[in-house]
Image (cartoon, helix red, strand yellow):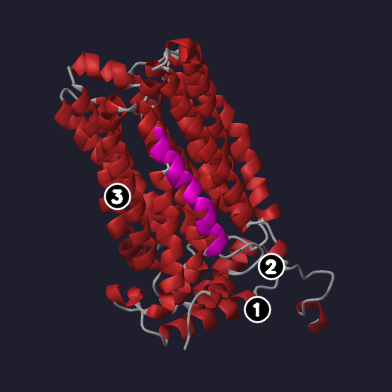
Amino acid sequence: MEEQLLPTEENKFSVGTSCSTTVVLSTCVVVCGSLAYGFAIGYSSPSQSGIMADLGLSIADYSAFGAILTLGGTIGALVSGAIADMVGRRITMWIMDLCFILGWLSIIFATSAWWLDVGRFLMGIGAGVFLYVAPIYIAEISPQSIRGACTAAITFMAYFGISVMFLIGNILTWRPLAIVGIIPSLVQLLGIFFIPESPRWLATIGLDKEVEASLKYLRGKNVDISSEAAEIKDNVESLQKLSGSRYLDMFNRKYAHSLIVGFGVVILLQSGGTDAIASFASSIFKKAGSSVSFATATMGLIQLPFAATGILLLDATGRRPVLMVASAGTCLGNFLVGVGFLCKDYDQMKQLSATLVVTGILVFSIFYSMGVGGAAMTIISEIFPMNIKGSAGSLAIVCNWFTSWIVTYAFNFLFERSPSGVFFIFTIFSGLMIPFVAKIVPETKGRTLEEIQASMTLLN
């Protein structure tokens, strides 16, 4: 009888290679939020002409509508870490869903620019919370061998959401399109009832029995979770001995490496034009003289297979090589767009303009979806120690949204003055990501969260 209760080589599996049904289900529920985020990002491009015509908005009004998502995202990011640390990851995702639902309802019934902006702002708050809590939750529940793939699935579904908006936005008007946008949040709102709380968050509030119960549920009946549970508890106990209970403690020198990596990656990411291109793709294609419907549909379709490839690459080759190669690709894409618009100023080269611009945007979309977005999100979810994860993680997302707001709001004005100049600026920032990753960002593939965070924290 005793021998049957003891783990043996036949019935004991490695946690690092365990992928249970619960992990898959939890990931699927979380990526519903990713789909909602993708819908929110992709909505403004196909709906631009319809909203401006129906509600009589100017370019300045619509620029504000597009950019206010990022302002709401900044607010959401500011409070996301504190909320997630206080009430847990699951309840935080419920709050996120409510923001998305109320935001979409405001847009669906909007009769003026004010209601549009209120809805877009609420959706921004939800998106800001999402960018923190979703990758953090996935990283905290996933086995190390598939953590990169699970986290990258968030980016894949975001691109799927953007693609869906671009595709059906050519068919539906802006109000029915907003009705489609609300669906993923309703699905996730129900799905959260069936997923467990993060065991690492449970450890931070001292619920040791719940930690083991959550791990057992996540890893499966035949997996010995004792060593993983012990590592999580030991890591939390050691970090609690360090400073880190106050917001400003994250700026202690011992956390400098984590902060530089986290903030640097998101600032360079957004300065490369990511959200501006996604939000105003229709305007870019129209300015270049290409078919807007064909170009946006192609952009939507081409991202998906490459985003799926990126899921596999993160755990196969590592985060650093994927991020560097993909950044080189986005740099090339931005450069081609800049050259394309430059050609419009020369009569003998005008015929090349539309081709170069569309090619450049597609190249940018391919490499961003294949690696930049997924690798950056994965790294951010892995590097911060548990005792500063709430404050540092939320501040990193604030940097992401604030940079996105600056770039998105300024884009239309700068684009009107110098279309090529804007994309050459994006080229520079995309290129800067390569030496930054090569010199500063560590490889996190195949390591537990506790190992990564210990290696980046100065204990002396």
Q: Earlier in the sequence, mark 1 or mark 2?
A: 2
Residue receiving disc 3: 402
Check residue 437 for magenta coloring: yes
The residue where tag 1 is placed is 227
**Nearer the camera: disc 2 or disc 3:** 3
The Cα atoms of the two marked residues, 1 and 3, are separated by 40 Å
Labels 1 & 2 near each other (Cβ < 8 A) = yes
Give coordinates of residue 176: x percent, y percent.
Answer: 35, 20
Q: Is residue 421 left or right of residue 380?
A: left
Label 3 sits on a secondary structure element that is helix
Give how far across and how far down residue 60 sits, in percent.
19, 28
Residue 61 in picture, x, y percent from top left: 19, 27
Element under disc 1: helix
Residue occupied by mark 2: 15
The quadrant in which the N terminus is found is bottom right
Which residue: 46% across, 32% down? 162
Compare marks 2 and 3 and give the one earlier in the sequence. 2
User: What is the span of residues highlighted in magenta in the rendered image?
Assistant: 423-439
Q: How many marks?
A: 3
What's the residue type where badge 1 is placed?
Ser
- Is label 2 in contact with label 3 (beta carbons under 8 Å)? no
Q: Residue, x 37% and y 66% (percent of image)?
A: 392
Residue 394 falls inside the magenta stretch: no
Mark 3: few, some, or many residues within 10 Å (few <14, many ≥20)? many
